Image (cartoon, helix red, strand yellow):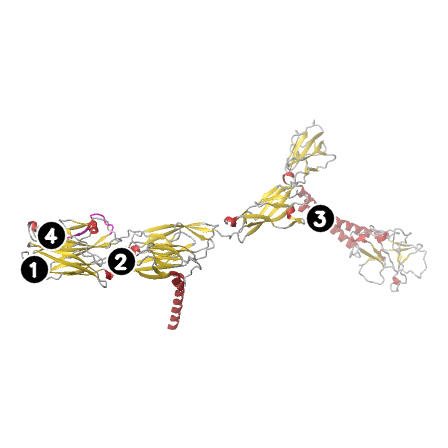
Amino acid sequence: MQTKEMELIQLIAVFLLYWVAAEAVINLKYGINEEMKPGSVIGNVTKDALKQGFQIALQPPYLRVISNSEPRWVELSPAGILTTQMKIDRDVVCRQNPKCIISLEVMSNSMAICVIKVEIEDLNDNAPRFPTSHIDIEISENASPGTRFPLEGASDPDSGIFGVQSYSITPNELFGLEIKTRGDGSKIAELVVQKSLDRETQSHYTYEISAEDGGDPPKIGAVQLNIKVIDSNDNNPVFDEPVYTVNVMENSPINTLVIDLNATDPDEGTNGEVVYSFNSYVTEKTRDTFNIDPGTGIITVNGVLDYEAAKIYEIDVQAKDLGPNSIPAHCKVTVNVMDTNDNPPVISLLSLNTEVVEVSENAQRGYVIALVRVSDKDSGANGKVQCRLQGNVPFRLQEYESFSTILVDGRLDREQKDTYNLTIQAEDSGTPPLRATKSLVVKVTDENDNPPHFLKPHYQEMVMENNLPGSCLLAVSAEDPDLGMNGTVSYSIIPGEIKHMDVNTYVSINPSGRIYSMRSFDHEYTRTFDFKVLARDNGNPSLSSNATVRIVVLDVNDNTPVMTNPPLVNGTAEVSIPRNAGVGYMVTQVKADDYDEGENGRLTYTISEGDRAFFEIDQVNGEVRSTRMFGENAKSTYEITVVARDHGKPSLSASAYIVVYLSPDLSAQEPIGPVNLSLIFIIALGSIAAILFVTMIFVAVKCKRDNKEIRTYNCSFFYLRRVAEYSYGNQKKSSKKKKLSKNDIRLVPRDVEETDKMNVVSCSSLTSSLNYFDYHQQSLPLGCRRSESTFLNVENQNSRNAAPNHGYQHPFTGQAHQQPDLIINGMPLPETENYSIDSSYVNSRAHLIKRYVLIRNCYQHLVTVVICNCFI
């Protein structure tokens, strides 16, 4: 388990290492001494950055400076050399700050970021200095040993160890110095009485106070100390505490109580009356910020307390009675200014243009568009700031130690949105939190990533035939949301053929997308034709798209309506109606056809002339109806002229002259409403078909019962076979007339293959209808031409087994001489022989067959009519 855990930890460490290397910026640190002359080289940023894997352009400028905290002191050349611009005095730039750092942020052409920090190291170039040339102090002669008197300290602009480190006084036996460190790190000295004083022995003393820094060699500043010994006052004021510490919130209003000091003096009268004041070496800034009441010792706020300007104040207060030779009492009040969340975050943009940033719409994720620096003067949680981008935008904020970057975090499409108003919000962690916002406009630059887009994928234009060549048919338009040349569109026609001819012989297109006809179109020859139009932009590389254009050639109104109902004879039609016909009786229905289309073929019927008072016509369906009753005295004929007019421009018309006769023989029935003639016709045909079907079944059953020998295998061929014995060939002719009975003849299938089959009669017309045979004399089956009949062969029953020796065949032709009635075994029967067939029997059977065929054909015809009417 431990091995697996170690491997997992190693994997996580490797991942974090790569992640940090990919995400973190490169940091370079340099250090220089103050007081360097202008032009001094601080470092080669280009070289040092390359060593750390920083991506730098191949030619100057290698780096672009985004921000510089002190542009007066340092600069970065185009070659990446960091130099000083002027002599740097750290004590002016950073004063007493322990670290003095100048920060620069630079960016390469690949948007990689490098943070440069230059630390200015302090030199001991300043000696300690007292604010005045001498210090005057009065001490009562009864001051006991150990009494302390604070002295005004010396200042040194140098920081750290090069500041004031110690004080010394001219060696003597009466006074000594004790060094104390203040809250801000500075050191002060207190004069300590070491032995009793006697004003009568010596009333004035002069010493030298020296302040020494920590340099090597150290620098020293000195001031003269003048001590005056005054007559004694028995009791001196005494503070409750030698040191007081109080906390005051910054931005406290004026007269806010800081502390109420109290010093007691047991003397009476003026010797016990205590007066409070600030020591003489309290700074003017402290005096402007605080006020002390001389009578009560109450210290109040007198100015603006700003934690960011001064975090701590040390006030030296003395209390002195009004008696002669008073010895003042001293205490120190340390005022800690407490931070409040009174400073909102400050957002600074470090891009070249702080208002507008441009980025290509092809920019990939992670592309840096701007640097952001956020600061808050407050401390602690009040100064801890979090930044974010407001809104749903394809950008994100990446935070680093001293700044943040705005990166592309989604797909950019200028055609959908070309401008983004980014709002950066910074919020601290104070209570209540303070916020700040900063707006940044991001403009997305164009790339040729959109082909032209037609407003419609298919265009259709109606054109009247017989148009003029060169006339404008229509205009196509394609939009390209890209800008400039990327969005400039030109049009052309894709090569093709129409009716085996080049499309350019039909139409042409100009650069603006207008399509013109190159010929006059003919509706009867070309009703529609299609071609494709190409739209191409001028980008590099160019993009294109196409659309289909269909031209529909419309017919003009060049066809006059034609009357079809009622039938006209020389433009006139005659109809009869009963004399007692009522109002609304339909006289007739006028119908006309117009081969034009649309409005050109839509007809309207009107009565233009004649007895219009007696009749009216439906303008849509052309039904002519009576409008009044016809009496006994009405005239016998009425005349009207009906006009069928189309709606073309110009309109064309046709007229029918209708003569209406009043007939007393016809009965008038008031039409209840429009009658569906098709339905009535279908019902009638259906009834007839049913009756015929029943009749056909009845006839078929009867025929089958009467003659079971009749079989219909093939309607194209019939075979007659004689069963009666008959011999022909070697027998002599007999003068006795023989008669064939019905038993001598029967129907057999054609596919029967017998050696004795004879009597074949073939007729092509039998395939379509069955006919009866009349074998009397030389008559052939009905519907057969003589040229179609082959032969009729009858054989003797006794000679069926004998092979025929006669191959004689005599086809019937119209040009031949008189043919024999029968052909037996290929030889004609002698006319002297009196053979006869029972014609009544044959005719009756043939008559039944003919009736059956006629009934079947009529039934098939009726069924066809019924089906057609159903579809109609």
Where does the image place residue 481, in percent across and percent down from the top left?
A: 50, 49
Q: Which residue is mark 3?
A: 864
Q: Is residue 80 left or right of residue 749?
A: left
Q: Give the number of the mark in front: 3 or 2.
A: 2
Query: Looking at the rendering, in which quadrant would you find the N terminus?
Result: bottom left
Q: Which residue is mark 2?
A: 97
Cα–Cα span, label 3 and label 1: 155 Å
Q: Which residue is mark 4?
A: 320
**Amino acid tagged 3:** Thr
SS class, disc 1: loop
Q: Is residue 769 left or right of residue 66?
A: right
Q: Give the number of the mark in front: 3 or 1.
A: 1
**Amino acid tagged 1:** Ser
Range drawn in magenta: 250-262
SS class, disc 3: helix
Residue 819 drawn above or below residue 651? below
Residue 675 drawn above or below residue 491? above
Q: Quick check: is 862 in the magenta stretch?
A: no
**Amino acid tagged 4:** Lys
Q: Earlier in the sequence, mark 1 or mark 4?
A: 1
**Quadrant in which residue 11 is drawn:** bottom left
Q: Earlier in the sequence, mark 4 or mark 2?
A: 2
Dots 1, 4 in contact, CB < 8 A: no
Q: Which mark is residue 196?
A: 1
Dots 4, 2 in contact, CB < 8 A: no
Where does the image place residue 122, in percent across and percent down from the top left?
A: 27, 60
